[in-house]
Image (cartoon, grey):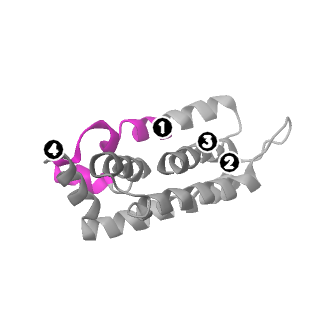
Amino acid sequence: MLIGVGIISFSSLGLVVASVTNTMQETQVLNQLLWLPLIFSLAPRSPWAFCRAQYKRIGLFLPATYLVNGLQQTIVNSATPGARYAEILSLAVWACLTFFLSAPTLSVGAGSQDSSAGKNCWSQPQRSPFVLLGVVENRTDRILLEAKSAFLL
């Protein structure tokens, strides 16, 4: 279930990119700016138990953190989907926001190129689940404690 929600939520990010850009060159640049930090972000790259504290705090605002933590807890601690409700819910909300906010601005076909200035306002609210979760997780340290216990067995 977590893998399916993760696939859908990260795939819907492609819709945001397509709805904000007008040309293929803009799309390639924006994809590089979005995907490289997500791929090389803190969570998938190295165990959290061995990272600096400031990197851990910044990583709590990234969507990859919640997918990776949910998968690690499922594999290491045999966590059920009910126990991973925060990760599943955050990725599902992000998928819904990115899909429904990018759909009105998605222009398909030749001659339907609008200016990006009006389109960018539609892509702003899709960040809200991870801004809220980052603030909550920085106060509670739930994910950081789970990650530390998973690697220090």
Q: State the residue position of label 3.
A: 14
Mark 1 / mark 4, whichever is N-terminal? 1
Residue at screen point 44% across, 58% down = 81
Q: Are marks 1 and 4 in contact (CB under 8 Å)?
A: no
Provide the residue designation for mark 4. Answer: 50
SS for callout 1: helix
In magenta, the rendered stretch is: 33-59
Q: Is residue 98 above or below residue 133?
A: above
> In the image, what residue type sits under mark 3?
Gly
Which amino acid, by three-letter code, is at mark 2?
Ser
Report the disc number at residue 35.
1
Residue to which mark 2 is pinned: 116
Residue 56, magenta (yes or no): yes
The kind of residue tagged 4 is Phe
Q: Determine which quarter of the picture holds residue 15.
A: top right
Q: Is residue 119 left or right of residue 113?
A: left
Q: Is residue 87 above or below residue 34?
A: below
Label 1 sits on what residue type?
Trp
Q: Main secondary structure of the magenta part?
A: helix
Could you tell me how far apart the alpha carbons at marks 1 and 3 are, in whole angstroms? Answer: 10 Å
Labels 2, 1: front one: 1
Considering the numbered disc 2 on the image, is that residue within a helix, a strand or a loop?
helix
Callout 2: few (<14), some (14-19), or many (20+) C-alpha neighbours within 10 Å?
few
